[in-house]
Image (cartoon, rainbow, N blue to C red):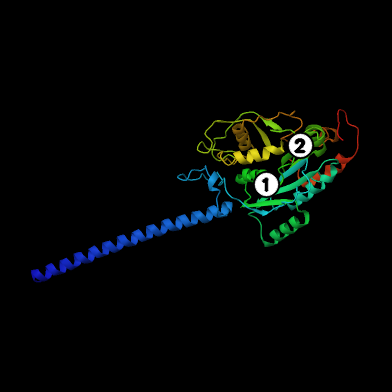
Amino acid sequence: MAPATYSRMKDAMQRQLQCSSKFILFCFLCIFLFSVLVHQHVYDIVNHLTHLPNSSRQKQIREFPPQNTTRHPLVPPYPYDYKFTINQPDKCRSEAPFLVMLVIVQGEDFVTRDAIRRTWGNVSNVSGVSIVRLFVTAISPRFNSSVELAFQEESSTYQDIIQQDFLDTYNNLTLKTLMGMEWVTKYCPNASYVLKIDSDMFLNVNYLVYTLLKPDLPARKNYISGYYIPKFRVQRLRGRKYYVPKEIYSKDMYPSYVAGQGYVFSGDMAKKIYDVAQIVPLIHIEDAFVGICLEKLQIKITVSPRALFNMLRINYNHCRFHALITVHHYGPEELLQIWQDFQTSRKCPSTKNR
């Protein structure tokens, strides 16, 4: 082969290799950019499905997390303009109730709500005061079309359910409590007292109203009481139910708080806690978060006798249950079993119920 021909062929091959290299590099960059866009799109979808927020944020109060940081997976987006998908805005329009009961429950717990309506949630059992009962729910991940239809029918029938558009998960329990605070703030600001209570509880409403709160006295202000928990160590072991890493809450001890199974507070506290929650970094441990808000507000807990609010299970006893307010771990079947006996009149020592 002539040298000139060989040189031309060599130059052509080099140009072809250069073009191939540029094409390969171009393809690699395209694939890289496409993967980044897909990853971001998937992240946005997952984030939306996890919390189901609306598009508009409350920009004027969005102090946490900062715009240049990434939200921790354990921290729901908050402050956020969550919307009421089910609401009862007229509950307090005719009169300001003495007590609002916010019952934290999952949407699919039809049996539990029915049992509560027939037992301690039956507000007609308490004479002489106005009480509003509300079940606080979010979007259930276990709903199908038939369950959703039954849920909507139940809400229309009883008009005692409120719901916002975030997913109903354990890590969103703080959001459910703040939803209740928001509802009281916007739709029932003149309520004298508010009770936040879980659905797996026994509640002695008469003792709460007439022995602890006393409707014949002026309503307290800056008041909150329940099962008192002094400063408690933050759980740092990964994988535990109450695990909170330092990047979410840096202190080693929580401030004092009241156990989340059931606590009562004056009506003015709903707005104060809701407002300060807009600027306090949120944690998913609901009762400890309320304690952090109280610390920020510099409001002290009113310590009640421990026998009144019980975190643990106590076997039913007629006279003992008439001298307390809450007992934990009572499901719907057992509530219905004991309620008839609890309602019967019987002399009990040191009991001053009405």
Q: Quadrant of the C terminus?
A: top right
Q: Where, by quadrant of the figure, is residue 19 drawn?
A: bottom left
Q: Amino acid at mark 2?
A: Thr
Comparing 170 with 176, the one in front is: 176
Residue annotated with mark 2: 326
Q: Earlier in the sequence, mark 1 or mark 2?
A: 1
Asked whether residue 199 appears in the rendered view, the answer is no
Using the numbered discs, state the Cα–Cα distance from disc 1 to disc 2 in whole angstroms.
28 Å
Q: Nearer the viewer, mark 1 or mark 2?
A: 1
Asked whether residue 29 appears in the rendered view, the answer is yes
Where is residue 346 drawn, in percent x and y? 91, 35
Q: Secondary structure at mark 2?
A: strand
Residue annotated with mark 1: 186
55 displayed left or right of 3: right
Q: Amino acid at mark 1?
A: Lys
Where is residue 186 drawn, in percent x and y? 67, 46
